[in-house]
Amino acid sequence: MRKTILWMFFTLISLNLSAQSQRLEEIHGKTILLFTPHPDDDVFGAGGTIALLNRNHNKVYIVVYTNDNKGSYDPDMSSERLARIRRAEQEASEGLLGTPKENILWMGYDDGMLEYAPQPKLTEEATAIIRRIRPDVLLSVDPGEWYERWHKTDHRMAAFNTIDAVRAAEFWLYFPNQKLQQGLEPYRVPEMYFFYPAPQEANYWVNIESVADLKLEAAAKQVSQFEPSVTKYRPDWDAKDLEKAKAEMRKEQPRKDGHCVEAFRYATGFIQY
Ligand SMILES: [Zn+2]
């Protein structure tokens, strides 16, 4: 019995090592699933990596927890209209990165309200998505490794809910109706990359130099997320505002060894007991 456990332990270690030997930006023909709290965090946090994954003929799916329908100062804006605007911007933005709009899945929760969504339902929904898509690699907001981290609202819940769903997805007795009624088999996610890591916990960097300009173009499609459109909505840019926004994003983009990079925390699993 003990021998079997030891053997399993070493097999797991070697599996982890072999998984790490293939760089994220070099994988081809795999299935990638990314969970994002809002329809822009995927682009800001991992847009360059998404472009590289699409370029390498991977199948990329983006799950958006909320419709981002609150963040506007415009007194003439409504939640319904803002949700429509943000959805169209996200489709345009991800489209530039190579993700077709039918691969964007909307969970539809209201902006800022994810913490108050019924938790079992939220985890059940994310679990079903994981069991259906069966990703080779999963990306999500970093829940933090050693302690719970402060995040803005929605980011906290998206971070914790996604890893709760990753755990639930591998044990069929969580939400057994998914197997019994929907034919969704349990699934163990082999590799995870978390974006928005704390600097001291980032352990993986993707060189996005070749797609850095494309990332800025994609981010700029999210017009309503930037001034002056946040204060008074307009669907397009003045050339000088666009240049200013791009210059700020360029400045904020992390650099490592002289290259433009995106930072992640890489993980292969969680202690399950
Ligand atoms: Zn966000």
Image: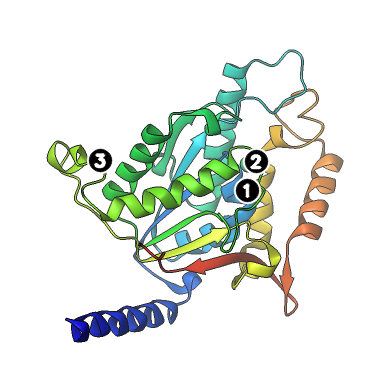
What is the three-letter code of the residue carrying label 2? Lys
Q: Nearer the viewer, mark 2 or mark 3?
A: 3
Q: Position of residue 29 (x, y in %)?
A: 34, 65
Give 14 or 85, whichever is nearer the viewer: 14
Gap in angstroms between the C-alphas marked 2 and 3: 38 Å
For residue 221, the mark is 2
- Residue 16 versus residue 45: which sits nearer the camera? 16
The residue at the point 62 percent across, 63 percent down is: 211
Position of 170 relative to 63 (above/below): below
| Label 1 sits on residue | 218
Q: In the orientation shown, which residue stands out farthest toward the left?
A: 180
Kind of element beneath mark 1:
helix
Question: On the picture, is 252 further left or further right than 169?
Answer: right
- Front residue of 2/99: it is 2
Which kind of residue does numbered mark 3 sit on? Phe
Q: Residue at x 63, y 60 (%)?
A: 197
Numbered tag placed on residue 77 in the rendering: none
Q: CA distance from mark 1 to mark 3?
A: 37 Å
Tell me the quarter of the image containing the C terminus.
Answer: bottom left
